Image (cartoon, rainbow, N blue to C red):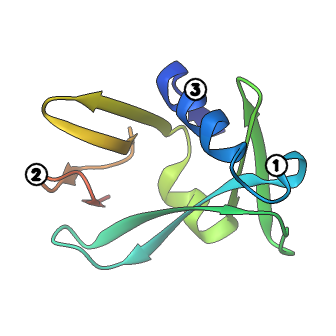
Amino acid sequence: MLFVSESAKNKIAELILLEAQPESTFVRVSVSGGGCSGLSYRMDFDNKLKEDDQEFEDKGIKLVTDLRSFLYIANTTLDFSDGLNGKGFHFVNPNASRTCSCGESFAV
C-alpha cells in the first residue's frame, strides 16, 4: 500500500484541478537509480496505466507505481510541507535504511 498525508492530499487535489483531464489524472510514483544515497524518488502526474502498474487509493488520491518501484516503496507515505525548512513533496519510507540530507534519495 502507498499512503498520502492530509497536507499532500490537499496540495495534489489543488494541482490536479490545473490538469487538462483532472478526472483521469493520477500520481505516478517511481524509483530510479541515482542520487547520493543510491536510489531516487520520482513523482509525476499521469493518466495512462501500464501493464505492470500497481494501483492504490488513499484519502481520495489515486497513486500508481510500477512493480519494481513498489518493492522499494511499499508502505511509504507521500507528504507535503510548506514550512520554513523547505517546501515541497517528500516521502516517508519505512524501508529506507538511510536517506540523504535533502530527502531526495535513499538506500534500502
User: Could you tell whether 100 is left or right of 6 in the image?
Assistant: left
All told, the count of numbered labels is 3
Q: Position of residue 22 (x, y in %)?
A: 82, 49
Q: Distance from label 1 to label 2 (Cα)?
A: 34 Å
Q: Nearer the viewer, mark 1 or mark 2?
A: 1
Q: Find numbered disc 2 in the image and state the secondary structure of the residue it sits on.
A: loop
Element carrying mark 3: helix
Q: Quadrant of the N terminus?
A: top right
Q: Residues within 10 Å of mark 2 (few under 14, many from 20)?
A: few
Q: Nearer the viewer, residue 33 or 48?
A: 48
Q: CA distance from mark 3 to mark 1?
A: 14 Å
Could you tell me the amino acid type at mark 3?
Asn
Residue drawn where x is 62% and y is 35% of the image: 14
Q: Which residue is mark 3?
A: 10
Q: Are marks 3 and 2 in contact (CB under 8 Å)?
A: no
On the image, the x and y values in percent for residue 76 come to: 49, 40
Q: Amino acid at mark 1?
A: Pro
Give the mark nearer the N terminus: 3 vs 2: 3
Q: Residue at x 59, y 29 (%)?
A: 9
Q: Who's the residue at 68% across and 67% down the image?
A: 66
Provide the residue designation for mark 2: 101
Q: Position of residue 32 (x, y in %)?
A: 44, 76
Q: Residues within 10 Å of mark 3 (few under 14, many from 20)?
A: some
In the structure shown, which secondary structural element does the residue marked by tag 1 occupy?
helix
Q: Residue at x 60, y 58 (%)?
A: 70
Q: Earlier in the sequence, mark 3 or mark 1?
A: 3
Sort mark 1 into few (<14), some (14-19) or many (20+) by Cα contacts within 10 Å: some
Label 2 near label 1: C-beta < 8 Å?
Answer: no
Q: Which residue is mark 1?
A: 22
